[in-house]
Image: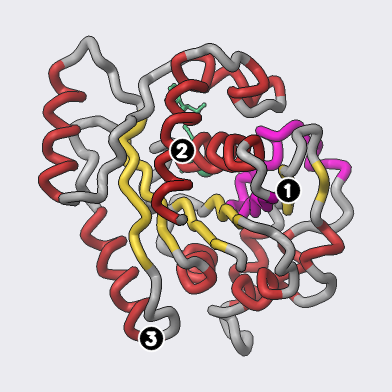
Amino acid sequence: MTTVISVTNQKGGVGKTTTAVNVAYYLAKAGKKVLLIDFDPQGNATSGLGVDKQELQSTMTEVLMGSTTLSEIILPTEHKNLFLAPTTPHLANTEVELAGAQHKFTRLKQAIETVPDYDVVIIDSPPSLSLLTVNGLIAAKYVLLPVQAEFYALEGLGQLLETMKLVRKSMNPTLDLLGVLPTMMDSRTTLSGQVFEEIKKHFPGKVFEHTIPRNIRLAEAPSHGLPVGAYDRWSKGARAYKAVTKEIIDRIG
Ligand SMILES: Nc1ncnc2c1ncn2[C@@H]1O[C@H](COP(=O)(O)OP(=O)(O)OP(=O)(O)O)[C@@H](O)[C@H]1O
Ligand SMILES: [Mg+2]
């Protein structure tokens, strides 16, 4: 059975794409067959894996519009077991076009059901609570929630939890919070520590034991088109994502 995980937080720049790419990489390294779906019109996961968006013929846009199938657009990567469903900025227009369409909330779910041979599907969501994000929440078994360790970290999360509740009530009763992942932790500041405690209070039992430090290698790796584990596997960032991925494997069983 395929486990679908949506990496979601409607706040921008909190580490969703970095988490999606690197967790996908380490799950693949652990022997799982992994599909990373770039579901953000920014296409950061696509370029972060070294794919040139100019060269793409068909992407998630065409899949959502029903003019091609998911398996048609999936690209292998240079990393064993890791596959990518790429996207381009056109996906933003698709969202508008879909607004009045039938089954607009379940298009991603239906697409994923056509590729049952993956062990794990990771969805990289856009920074909004949009139709795309809701498609992700309806398709997923789990939400992986990266939270940036900064003063406003928890602001806005109530709205996401509310949306998850609505999705559970309506179309996806088994949607579950896989875990909350504090990102860009700065061990030199007490603020990070305080925010971490605050996050733990807010999400008892849900915060991962390992957190993601602020680490320049994590920011550099996408410009080389690589997950950090392939760029600098001994960096703090790489080791942190590897450790978190172990926890994820324990949680998803
Ligand atoms: N732990 C980290 N240490 C240092 N830089 C990081 C870390 N995590 C992410 N970054 C950098 O911070 C920026 C935002 O990260 P990322 O793109 O993963 O966030 P996002 O939530 O996907 O953003 P968006 O909401 O725009 O999709 C990127 O430039 C990324 O390289
Ligand atoms: Mg992103």
Q: Is residue 238 visible?
A: yes
Does the stretch in magenta take in 40?
yes
Mark 1 or mark 2: whose residue is earlier in sequence: 1
Determine which residue is flagged by label 3. 170
Tag 2: amino acid? Lys
Comparing 91 with 86, the one in front is 86
Q: Which residue is located at x 34 percent, y 59 percent?
A: 177
Q: How far apart are marks 2 and 3 (CA)?
A: 32 Å
Looking at the picture, does residue 196 appear above or below residue 157? Answer: above
Q: Which residue is located at x 63 percent, y 85 percent?
A: 101
Does the stretch in magenta take in 190?
no
Q: How far apart are marks 1 and 2 (CA)?
A: 21 Å
Q: What stretch is highlighted in magenta?
A: 33-55
| Labels 1 and 3 touching (C-beta < 8 A) | no
Rendered-image quadrant of the N terminus: bottom right
Pointer 1: residues within 10 angstroms few (<14), some, or many (20+)? Answer: many
Q: In this view, does 32 lie to the left or right of 5?
A: right
Q: How far apart are marks 1 and 3 (CA)?
A: 29 Å
Q: Which residue is located at x 50 percent, y 30 percent?
A: 242
Tag 1: amino acid? Leu
Determine which residue is flagged by label 1. 84
Q: How is the image coloured?
A: secondary structure
Marks 1, 2: nearer the viewer:
2
Determine which residue is flagged by label 2. 246
Q: Where is residue 205 in the image (x, y as percent from the top left)?
A: 20, 50
Pointer 2: residues within 10 angstroms few (<14), some, or many (20+)? Answer: some
- Find numbered disc 3 in the image and state the secondary structure of the residue it sits on: helix
Looking at the picture, does residue 225 appear above or below residue 17? Answer: above
Q: Which residue is located at x 52 percent, y 65 percent?
A: 136
Marks 2, 3: nearer the viewer:
2
Looking at the picture, does residue 6 appear above or below residue 192? Answer: below
